[in-house]
Amino acid sequence: MKLTKIDLSNIVGVGHSNGQLGLLIDRGDQVEYIEIDAPEAALQGLQQVAFIANNDLGELSGSIEANQITSSQDQIAMLPVSSSMAKAIGYDADSQTLQIEFRSGAVYQYADVEEDTWESLRNADSTGKFFNSEIKNCYSSERLD
């Protein structure tokens, strides 16, 4: 495998909407916002790269699949979130299962969660506030660990 150094330190924000990957770039004297065509998987891939880069995962060798980032007991790819309540969130559209890894280390799955609710959680300004108002006590749940 050939490794290439990529400096992404000037990218201060990443988003995705309507097939466009939005990048907020610090140019020193200004902040520039650009959009490029990209599937949603591009955003999820960048979030997983950030998770790997910012967490001590020990020695990594070979390729890393999305479900290798999650615990071995589940198969839902998790996206890290900036929240005082949760470490990561994930969703399986086929089974309509939402999974949340809380800061405490507890992992819960919520059943029959609509994809619109998942998208709203993913895009919420506050993961915790959205969880408390729209998910907690609204869906049946199961603790995994």
Image (cartoon, rainbow, N blue to C red):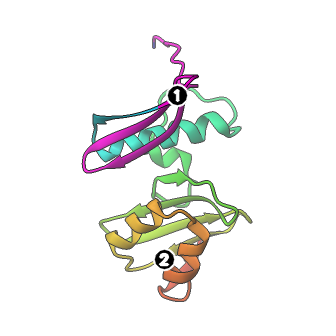
Q: From the viewer's side, name the closer residue of 72 and 88.
A: 88
Amino acid type for the residue under numbered disc 1: Gln
Could you tell me residue 100's position as x and y percent? Answer: 56, 66
Task: Pick whichever of labels 2 and 1 is earlier in the sequence.
Answer: 1
Q: The magenta stretch spans which residues?
A: 2-31
Could you tell me residue 109's position as x and y percent? Answer: 51, 73
Q: Could you classify mark 2 by the number of other residues whose Cα lies within 10 Å: few (under 14), some (14-19), or many (20 or more)?
A: some
Q: Which residue is mark 2?
A: 110
The image shows residue 40, relative to residue 136, as above or below, that is above
The image shows residue 1, relative to residue 111, as above or below, that is above
Amino acid type for the residue under numbered disc 2: Tyr
Q: From the viewer's side, name the closer residue of 47 and 69.
A: 47
* The N terminus - image quarter: top left
Question: Which element carries disc 1, helix, strand or loop?
Answer: loop
The image shows residue 79, relative to residue 131, as above or below, that is above
Q: Residue at x 55, y 75 (%)?
A: 131
Q: Which residue is mark 1?
A: 30
